[in-house]
Amino acid sequence: MSGPKTVSAIVVGLAKGHSLSEFYPVVHPTLVAALHKLEDTLLARGEDLHLDVAPGGLAAYGETVARRSPHVQRLAVRLAEHGVRELALRHQVTAESLGRLLSAIALPPRVVAVGGGLASALSAAGVSKVEVNGRLIEPAPLQVSADPPAPRAPGAPLGKTGGGLEDVALWSTHDMYQQVQLSARRVETENLDELRAMLREGSDSERIEALQRLEYVAQWCLERGMVDRAMNVISDLRADADAMARRNPATRGSIMMAMHRIANRTVIEEMVERLGRARTEETRVSLRGVLLALGAEVVTPLVRSLVAASDLSARRAYRDALVELDRVGVPLLEDMIGDERWFVVRNMVGILGEIRSADAVEHFARTVRHSDVRVRRETIIALSKFGGEEAVQQLLVGLVDAEASLRAAAALGLGLTKAGTAVMALVKRLGEETDLETAVEIVRALGRIGDPRAVQALAERASGGSLFSRTPLPIRLEAIRALGDIGGDAARAVLHRLMHDRNADVREAAIKASEGRSEQPA
């Protein structure tokens, strides 16, 4: 980590952790990694984090943060439903405590209410170093039985004793060989439909047994190169996990963990490849569901395939899968943004721009200043798709880039955002710009924004400049079109004067602009 992160980035990380806890079991590697990263971030910051639940989202120290992040909005709504007005995290809070906190917040409010409210639920879950509505959460004391373990009766079979301990049996080599043979025969003859029915409808012990046997089948198939059958088992498990989502969340979590244990790199890469080849939406939905359940480990193969894909359908399938992962809070490309290879960073920026993740703008603050011009260009293109004040501030950085074509691209992006906060910066840059095409793009952006504050600067360009500093004709014509787009008395007065200019092109442009026919390029 290069240094302490901003409050906005921490809040986004917390909100993504909440989104992850809504989908993944708390022991899933994707969620665990996100929680540990959040723990490290809070510790590095060295200060407690105090959040207010505001109508527009979450506020820190009186200022709303990450207002455009869907994850932050979702977390704010859920906190409000639980009656939380203030949430404070001590900077020493552990990943384990954060996981329990976010999992409790993700519960339906009616469930939490039955348990005595969120504070009581957090206390029962063992959460510490967290304050809710000004009250410090203290973990509930553990209830430990003082009863001694019951001894195993003489001659009783080996296994768990009354105290919960397990005896140890020693196997001979022949016993182990026979067990392996028996396991192989069982796997070859397993009825997977019966096991799945047991998993969905059986008792808790039967479900555990069915899941273990299904997992063993899949692992056995992979060891023997039977990838198709293993993938079918994983797909069936994903369907069973969806079916158990409301009926038995604990079983669903166990199924998802089994899927994660089964899916090695070969299986994941094969699934990604099949996703790109899929020709029906039903097949794509099924594969996306499996990849989503596997979590962060599928991001790199998806990104690699998206970058390499030439088929439009495959690119769309990979993009949709990445969007789905972003929707549940899976960290996508943040770590890759810091890669030393410029082409990797450029591709990551392009994908983030294509996904249009509201949480990506903060990462663009680094790449818009990247040493490689190709990365900066891709960043400006991506920012132009977003809008919002955060994107505008980054585009203003591009407006003073050393590369003229990037300044022009930033001006184009600012014009597309139509942000009034960019007007004076564009006017200032127009007075300093030496590149003809960039100046034209700046003028065009001012026309698109339509702010009257730009009229004076545009009037000077439209009039042709002074005797010793003539304005090139393309800039004059674009300034006239921009004045027509802005309108108002001051702009119309300038256009009326230019109708009598000595240059025929200027006269014609002024007439069209005054009549509302400026024909500004799209």
Image (spheres, helix red, strand yellow):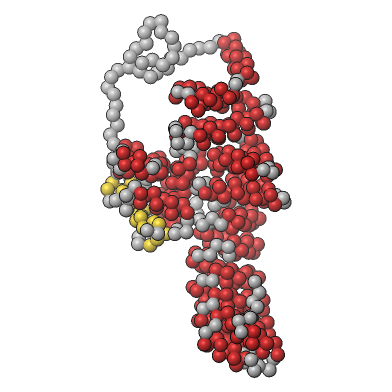
Q: Nearer the viewer, residue 215 or 277?
A: 277
Percent position of residue 285, x then y: 60, 42
Residue at (44, 59) in percent of width and height = 67
Quadrant occupied by the C terminus: bottom right
Question: Could you tell me if residue 257 is visible in this image?
Answer: no
Residue at (63, 48) in percent of width and height = 318
Residue at (35, 49) in percent of width and height = 81
Q: Nearer the viewer, residue 326 or 509?
A: 509
Residue at (51, 32) in percent of width and height = 255
Q: Is residue 24 above or below residue 487?
A: above
Q: Is residue 449 above or below residue 85?
A: below
Question: Could you tell me if residue 105 is visible in this image?
Answer: yes
- Residue sticking out furthest to the top: 155
- Residue sticking out furthest to the right: 310
Percent position of residue 495, x then y: 59, 88
Q: Quadrant of residue 446?
A: bottom right
Q: Is residue 76 left or right of residue 519?
A: left
Percent position of residue 120, x then y: 29, 40
Q: Quadrant of residue 249?
A: top left
How many numbered callouts?
0
Q: Is residue 447 left or right of residue 47?
A: right
Percent position of residue 250, x then y: 44, 32
Q: Is residue 335 left or right of residue 13?
A: right
